[in-house]
């Protein structure tokens, strides 16, 4: 199956017109497409199926405990299939079956270990103020993010442990947050704020054939070795913000195969 991957388009402020990539058989939107949700309609009538995993900015200014039904309805109006802690098996044009395992996978702030967690959560306070999301009438804070991240991690681990039993041939994981420090933005390196962008899910990567993510405003395409199998490919195809120079080298027409 040939996939087009887009994330971090930030169409609430950015000027960008997404177009179908020639040869792609599926479009994956890995979050932070539009904080207002309005630009989701740009994908209505897309020539191939569209899968969408929310990013953190799809929750901006909203209550995280009540937002998902409305976001799902906005996706349905555009003909988009939203996945959050959900799996979906699709049949590829060649007849093979591909399982998509998808979750936001909020940060648990343990990417540098438990001893550095408090420092990482303090660094996250700025990002939470920018998001201005709420939980029960108060700010959705770093501890809330960690709790959501742990729930995502538990679900992901359980889902990836399921045997295929002939139902799928390959597995693709889609998260918004990065699964490894290997996905860290090279501009910032390994600083406390990096824990707001990457998780230590390296032990889970080998259970997938392809892992797609966003959140980092840069591009990544690397391999993770796994004994007895082809390496897992990890890809981030974020566009980012033009005024920060993050769009330089971005190729929206790239196609990835699983």
Image (cartoon, rainbow, N blue to C red):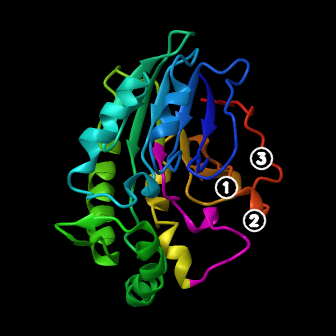
Question: x%, y% of residue 17?
Answer: 69, 34
Asked if the magenta segment contains residue 102, the reply would be no
Determine whether 93 is above or below 84 in the image.
Answer: above
Query: Which numbered disc flags the more N-terminal residue, 3 or 2?
Result: 2
Name the element at disc 1: loop
Residue at the disc numbered 2 = 244
Query: Which numbered disc flags the more N-terminal residue, 1 or 3?
Result: 1
- Depth check: 80 or 133 in front? 133
Determine whether 168 is above or below 37 in the image.
Answer: above
Q: Which residues are magenta?
A: 174-191
Name the element at disc 2: helix
Name the element at disc 3: loop
Q: Do the CB atoms of the residues marked 1 and 2 lie less than 8 Å apart?
A: yes
Q: Residue 1's image quarter?
A: top right
Disc number for residue 240: 1
The kind of secondary structure the magenta stretch mainly shows is loop
Determine whether 94 is above or below 183 in the image.
Answer: above
- Depth check: 95 or 196 in front? 196
Disc number for residue 71: none
- Depth check: 126 or 7 in front? 126
Question: x%, y% of residue 19?
Answer: 69, 27
Separation of marks 1 and 2 at Cα, in angstroms: 8 Å
Question: x%, y% of residue 80?
Answer: 43, 27
Q: Nearer the viewer, mark 3 or mark 2?
A: 2
Q: Do the CB atoms of the residues marked 1 and 3 lie less than 8 Å apart?
A: yes
Residue at the disc numbered 3 = 250
Residue at left 45%, top 61%? 201
């Amino acid at each position: 199956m040939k996939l087009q991957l887009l994330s971090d388009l930030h169409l609430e402020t950015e000027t960008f017109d997404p177009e179908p990539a020639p040869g792609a058989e599926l479009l994956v939107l890995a979050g932070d497409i539009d904080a207002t949700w309005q630009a989701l309609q740009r994908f209505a009538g897309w020539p191939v199926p569209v899968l969408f995993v929310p990013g953190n900015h799809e929750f901006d200014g909203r209550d995280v405990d009540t937002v998902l039904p409305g976001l799902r309805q906005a996706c349905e109006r555009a003909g988009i299939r939203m996945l959050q802690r959900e799996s979906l098996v699709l049949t590829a044009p060649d007849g093979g079956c591909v399982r998509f395992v998808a979750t936001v996978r909020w940060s648990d702030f343990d990417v540098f270990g438990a001893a550095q967690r408090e420092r990482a959560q303090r660094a996250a306070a700025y990002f939470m103020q920018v998001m201005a999301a709420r939980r029960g009438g108060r700010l959705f804070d770093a501890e809330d993010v960690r709790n959501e991240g742990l729930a995502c991690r538990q679900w992901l681990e359980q889902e990836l442990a399921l045997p295929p039993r002939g139902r799928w041939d390959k597995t693709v994981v889609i998260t918004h947050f990065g699964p490894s420090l290997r996905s860290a933005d090279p501009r910032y390196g390994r600083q406390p704020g990096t824990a707001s962008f990457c998780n230590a899910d390296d032990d889970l990567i080998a259970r997938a054939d392809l892992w797609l993510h966003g959140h980092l405003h840069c591009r990544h395409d690397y391999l993770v070795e796994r004994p007895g199998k082809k390496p897992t490919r990890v890809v981030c195809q974020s566009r980012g913000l033009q005024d920060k120079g993050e769009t330089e080298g971005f190729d929206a027409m790239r196609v990835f195969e699983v």
